[in-house]
Image (cartoon, rainbow, N blue to C red):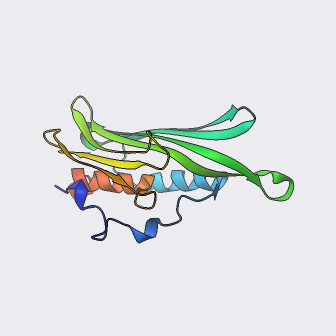
Amino acid sequence: SGDARDFKVDASGANPKHVGRRDWHLYEDYKRVNENKLANYAFIENIEMAFVEIDHEGHLFVQFDATLHLPRSVILEVTKFFETERRGKGQGRIYVRGVSYRYNAWIEGRHNILRYDNGHDFDDFHGHWWDKDTGDLLDCRSMSRDEFPLFSEVIEEIDKIMGFTADD
């Protein structure tokens, strides 16, 4: 019965391994890394995932949507928006950098268990945690871009809260 609020690694709340991770990444590498990392979580029952390229006034943006079905009717929905930049010889390689994030996990038919987002402002990151049994809000706090977890870390946090791998 892990408490989501214990997930940070030091007293300041900062996680040093996060620094710089939200920089530019080669788009093809980013897609491959996501697919490979998700394959490592044996407890994931089903994954629906899509990268959608959006042309907005001549600028390319990428939207990433994923829905993960986990044990005990837990669902994790993910939406991310990325700005893009073309680089390399002939400017043919697309690089992406995330600007908007939403991770929302809940127990289907019941209540939320955690949410991370910056939907209100691209530089205003938040974490929200609910009691997994009662649905009572436990905590809501702002965090820096460097504290904000990666997709894989959100999955690991849900596992810690729900104890999926403890069932193995």
Instruction: Kindly identify the residue that appears in the image at 63 percent across and 56 percent down.
Output: 29
Residue 60's place in the image compared with 30, above or below, is above
The quarter of the picture where the C terminus appears is bottom left
Q: Position of residue 146 (x, y in %)?
A: 45, 61
Instruction: Kindly identify the residue that appears in the image at 55 percent across and 49 percent down.
Output: 98
Whether residue 17 can be seen here: yes
Residue 58: quarter of image: top right
Residue 108: quarter of image: top left
Q: Position of residue 144 (x, y in %)?
A: 41, 58
Asked if residue 87 lies left or right of residue 13, the reply is right
Asked if residue 147 lies left or right of residue 1, the reply is right
How many callouts does the rendering have?
Answer: 0
Asked if residue 59 lies left or right of residue 129, the reply is right
Residue 14's place in the image compared with 58, above or below, is below
The quarter of the picture where the N terminus appears is bottom left
Instruction: Kindly identify the residue that appears in the image at 26 percent across and 52 percent down.
Output: 164
Whether residue 168 can be seen here: no
Asked if residue 102 lies left or right of residue 98, the reply is left
Instruction: Kindly identify the residue that appears in the image at 44 percent across and 52 percent down.
Output: 151
In this view, which residue lies farthest toward the left? 134
Residue 134: quarter of image: top left
In this view, which residue lies farthest toward the top? 109
Q: Position of residue 117 (x, y in %)?
A: 40, 44
Q: Position of residue 155 (x, y in %)?
A: 36, 52
Residue 166's place in the image compared with 140, above or below, is below
Residue 58's place in the image compared with 22, above or below, is above
Of 78 and 140, which appears nearest the observer? 140
